[in-house]
Amino acid sequence: MTAKLIRELGAGVGIALPEVRVVGEDPVLPSVFPLGTMAATSAGALTAAVAAYARRIGRSDEERSGGRQPVRGAHGDPDVTIDARHAAVAFQSERHFRTDGKAMDVWAALSGDYRTSDGWVRLHCNFDHHRDAAVRALGLPPGSGKEDVGRACAGRTAVEIEDAVIREGGCAAAMRSRAEWLAHPQARALAGLPLVGVSRLSVRGGVLGDLGTGLPAGIERPLGGVRVLDLTRVIAGPVAARALAAYGADVLRVGAAHLPEVPGLVVETAFGKRSCRIDLRSQADRLRELVRQADVVIQAYRPGALRARGFGPDDLAALRPGVVCVDISAYGARGPWASRRGFDSLVQMACGIAHENGDGLRPSPLPAQALDHGTGYLAAFGAVAALLRRAAEGGSWHVEVSLARTAAWLDDLGRIDGAGVPQPRVEDLLATMDSPFGTLTYVMPPGAIDGTRPRWTSPPPRQGEHPAAWAPSS
């Protein structure tokens, strides 16, 4: 099933993928949803696309296999493999991440599920301004605690709270059943959208055969020479850029001192990247200079937010003909919720997943931030697919993915008898790396091409550690 799903993903974005050998099957994680299949499909599709890209640019087998004799698949294709257990554990990467043996706590005090007069609502308060918005929406004074929030929620309906928090600029989601979500206008707006949208931008430019900004001779890794701007935070976008870095892309993460971060996550998702800071309120020209030399730009601001600052897909293509623009959103770029803020835990609530994963009486989240990780891998897959399309057809390209569309895909994959399975073995999938933060324990990236596995060659940097410039050797 997984190999077939990967072929379908390739066909959906207009590229031919080599066959993928899938190891293992569901159930892998404790859930009624086939998360092992979801993880293996999205990570396996990326692996296959990278293999196709490496073949397209003529990277030799000896280079890609480190001088070893490569294992060949049928018809001389590269041998592409994905392990379902490894992919599923990678979807839980933040759970297994350790700094000097210590796990991270990613949830703020007020973040969580609250009982309402007619069900449940989830508040996402990891950023202070989202916490303050939720408190205001509930009519509570600043500094209110979890018990105060619980009492305020108990007297109101879930949708009433959701609407009030959104009006205040916060993040919330009422728990809906699958049927309730499918009847919602936003679900209907998403129904006709592809899982991974890849389309050619109308802006003229982009050279036929354009393979990257440099492609230095002797580069061994498949995406070496591909420059990726990472304009994202929390979790899908950073996962996408981190996955590309594992295959050798030069990833420059752009943050700003005034933008909040989740401390542990900003480290865990930064392997293989460099980090700079640019304040778009006063330094937009610095970002434009980076765009002019980029191959891929990944952004996860709310739809339209960067366009309003002159960095929409058409603007980026005008700056850099041949660019691949990757847009990641919570609920998609169309429909009444297109501009709504959202995170994985909220989309699980809104789309019926948290309802169906348990008994329907209280929320039961997935045992992974699977919508985030799945969307991240699909975004990375879409980026490589667009690079292949650019090489074959020229032009600039636009990739669109969303957590809610990924949730619909997971729903379409059906159900399994997996609620009671134990957590998978992880010890053989972990590695350690020294870093400025201490010794980090992390999940290695899944997949292999001709026996060679993706890897990160540098630890997470400190925020803003690097200049706002591309590495000289890239």
Image: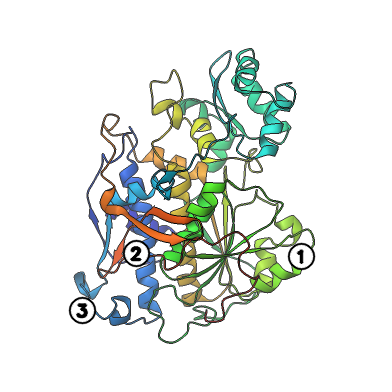
Residue 379, percent from left and from top:
49, 56
For discs 2 and 1, the disc positioned in front in the rendered view: 1
The residue pinned by badge 1 equals: 283
Q: Are marks 2 and 1 in contact (CB under 8 Å)?
A: no
Give the class, few, some or many, for how many residues have Cα within 10 Å of label 3's Cα (few <14, many ≥20): few
* Front residue of this view, candidates 44 and 244: 244
Q: Earlier in the sequence, mark 2 or mark 1?
A: 2
Which amino acid, mark 3?
Gln
Tell which residue pokes out farthest to the bottom in this image. 217
The residue at the point 37 percent across, 79 percent down is 220
Give the vertical position of 21 relative to 126 (above or below): below
Residue 13 seen: no
Secondary structure state at the residue bearing disc 2: helix
Residue 453, percent from left and from top:
31, 65
The quadrant where residue 274 appears: bottom right
The residue at the point 57 percent across, 44 percent down is 330
The residue pinned by badge 3 equals: 69
Give the vertical position of 456 relative to 155 (above or below): below
* Front residue of this view, candidates 341 and 98: 98
Residue 392, percent from left and from top:
46, 76
Which amino acid, mark 1?
Gln
Which amino acid, mark 2?
Ala
Colour treatment of the image: rainbow
The residue pinned by badge 2 equals: 48
Residue 396 seen: yes
The quadrant where residue 18 appears: bottom left
Give the class, few, some or many, for how many residues have Cα within 10 Å of label 2's Cα (few <14, many ≥20): many
Give the vertical position of 9 relative to 334 (above or below): below
